Image (cartoon, rainbow, N blue to C red):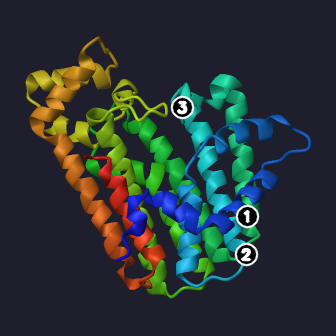
Amino acid sequence: MDTQHMQDRPHDALAAHLADDLTAVNALIRKTMASEHAPRIPEVTAHLIEAGGKRIRPMLVLSAAELCGYDGAHHHHLAATVEFIHTATLLHDDVVDESAQRRGRATANLLWDNKSSVLVGDYLFARAFQLMVACGSLRVLDILSNASATIAEGEVLQLTTAQNLGTTEDQYLRVIRGKTAALFSAATESGAVLAGASEDKVRALFTYGDALGISFQMVDDFLDFGGAGDGIGKRIGDDFRERKVTLPVIRAVARADETERAFWQRTIAKGDQQDGDFEQACAIIAKHGTLEDTRTEALEWSERAKEALIVLPDTPLRAMLSDLATYVVQRLK
């Protein structure tokens, strides 16, 4: 395997490889987010889209299409589509979570208001569907519309699992598929379908995106209890403060003694959190080894992502996608 690109971050290597396509996608994004009659729409959208996101999801579309030999121009529409869906969900998430920071900047709901964030998010969803229709593929439309429904379903499920100590691991997996993996897998699968790839390659790229997204989210959930602030606005302990029941907590609750169960009941179920409670939560999680469990699960999903790529052509681009799956879990160290 060519290891040159591992000297840099894999998403930077991907961005360099896809530079011309990304330029075209960014131009399409700027054109499509314009609104002649409601200038607040491009104001709010630009605040988030221009905030330094890595464009991972659009790059997954472009990479899948290239790996499968696509030589048209509709992959740009697809890449812009997934970025709009992603941005719309971020706008809505920040309202739901009452967030004040995103990527190191004040959130749109803080700078403007909740109404603007929700309505601009709705506008971006509508624009996303216009873009995907332009591809002229009912199957692509089916993939991305199903993913949009899964994302929304996952967000609603997260509302009901938050504060609920009875949350199962199956429910947790459904939530993180909605939060992250559904759009990753839709990006890779739709890129392959657009290219007219064989079913084994379509399935492989779906599996890659799904496993990459699950691994990515599990790493985030690990870092909330076991990491340091990432320097772009995410603080450790946010999930605990928001009473989200993630894998480290689910397994700690399952192994809790009577005193620990009372602690989780007070802090997560009832929301009575006091100074020192986060540190206590970390201590309980460490005692039961549930961070290590989460690390192991994330690594296994990363390996699944890499294994899925084997049926695809052995090119530098495939190596970059494999490296991306490795890089996602390097944050666990």
- Decide: few, some or many residues near mark 2? Use Cα within 10 Å; few <14, some 14-19, many ≥20: few
- Whether pointer 3 and pointer 1 mark residues with C-beta atoms closer than 8 Å, the reply is no
How far separated are the C-alphas under marks 3 and 1? 26 Å
Residue denoted by label 3: 104
In this orientation, which residue lies closer to the viewer: 103 or 287? 103
Q: Nearer the viewer, mark 1 or mark 2?
A: 1
Res 146 visible: no
Q: Is residue 257 left or right of residue 1?
A: left
Q: Is residue 213 left or right of residue 198?
A: left
Please count the marks in the image. 3
How far separated are the C-alphas under marks 3 and 2? 34 Å
For label 3, the SS is loop
Specify the amino acid type for callout 2.
Ala
Marker disc for residue 73: 2
Specify the amino acid type for callout 3.
Gly
- Whether pointer 1 and pointer 2 mark residues with C-beta atoms closer than 8 Å, the reply is yes
Marker disc for residue 24: 1
For label 1, the SS is helix
Residue 247: quadrant of the picture: top left
For label 2, the SS is loop
Q: Name the residue rendered at 23%, 49% in the picture.
A: 295
- Disc 3 or 1, which lies upstream in sequence? 1
Specify the amino acid type for callout 1.
Ala
Q: Nearer the viewer, mark 3 or mark 2?
A: 3
Q: Name the residue rendered at 61%, 62% in the picture.
A: 145
Q: Name the residue rendered at 74%, 76% in the picture.
A: 136
Q: Name above or below for residue 304 compared with residue 117.
A: below
- Disc 3 or 2, which lies upstream in sequence? 2
Residue 106: quadrant of the picture: top right
